[in-house]
Image: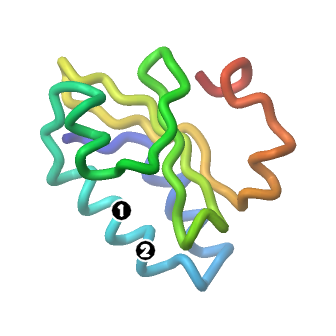
């Protein structure tokens, strides 16, 4: 899968040192993925939340951090929309603002 918006993850990774290695692993897993449906995504990430409009929330570091990704299964593109702490996530309206 093509991962667009990596700069968001790089900035996030640089801001929070304790999630650095997990972000790198997450990027690699997205790049290696070839999911064709939400069901396939949920096989790998059962705790990912489906927000609708092909938008998903992934928990990192035991749900301390969250990453919002929009996925186009046909074109095999994962667009990183947002990444930050769970506390910051609770301050935004993800469906309206990001998806």
- Above or below, 82 against 39 in this view is below
Q: Position of residue 86 (x, y in %)?
A: 73, 57
- Position of the C terminus, as image quadrant, is top right
Tell whether 79 sits left or right of 12: left
From the image, tell me which residue sits under label 1: 26
Q: Position of residue 13 (x, y in %)?
A: 55, 71
Of 41 and 67, the residue lying toward us: 41
- Position of the N terminus, as image quadrant, is top left
10 Å neighbourhood of mark 2: few (<14), some, or many (≥20)? few
Q: Residue at x 34, y 51 (%)?
A: 45
Q: Position of residue 91 (x, y in %)?
A: 86, 43
Q: Position of residue 93 (x, y in %)?
A: 78, 29
- Return the mark for residue 81: none
SS at badge 2: helix
Q: CA distance from mark 2 to mark 1?
A: 6 Å
Tell whether 44 sits left or right of 56: left
**In contact (CB < 8 Å): disc 2 and disc 1:** yes
Of 91 and 12, the residue lying toward us: 91
Instruction: Say which quarter of the image contains residue 96.
Output: top right
Q: Residue at x 55, y 72 (%)?
A: 61
From the image, tell me which residue sits under label 2: 22
Q: Residue at x 34, y 37 (%)?
A: 78
Of 1 and 44, the residue lying toward us: 44
């Amino acid at each position: 899968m093509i991962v667009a918006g990596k700069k968001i993850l790089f900035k996030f990774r640089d801001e929070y040192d304790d999630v650095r290695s997990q972000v790198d692993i997450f990027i690699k897993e997205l790049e290696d993925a070839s999911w064709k449906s939400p069901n396939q995504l949920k096989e790998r990430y059962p705790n990912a939340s489906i927000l609708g409009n092909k938008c998903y929330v992934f928990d990192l570091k035991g749900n301390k951090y969250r990453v919002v990704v929009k996925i186009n299964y046909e074109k095999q593109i994962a667009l990183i929309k947002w990444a930050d702490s769970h506390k910051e996530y609770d301050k935004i309206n993800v469906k309206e603002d990001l998806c």
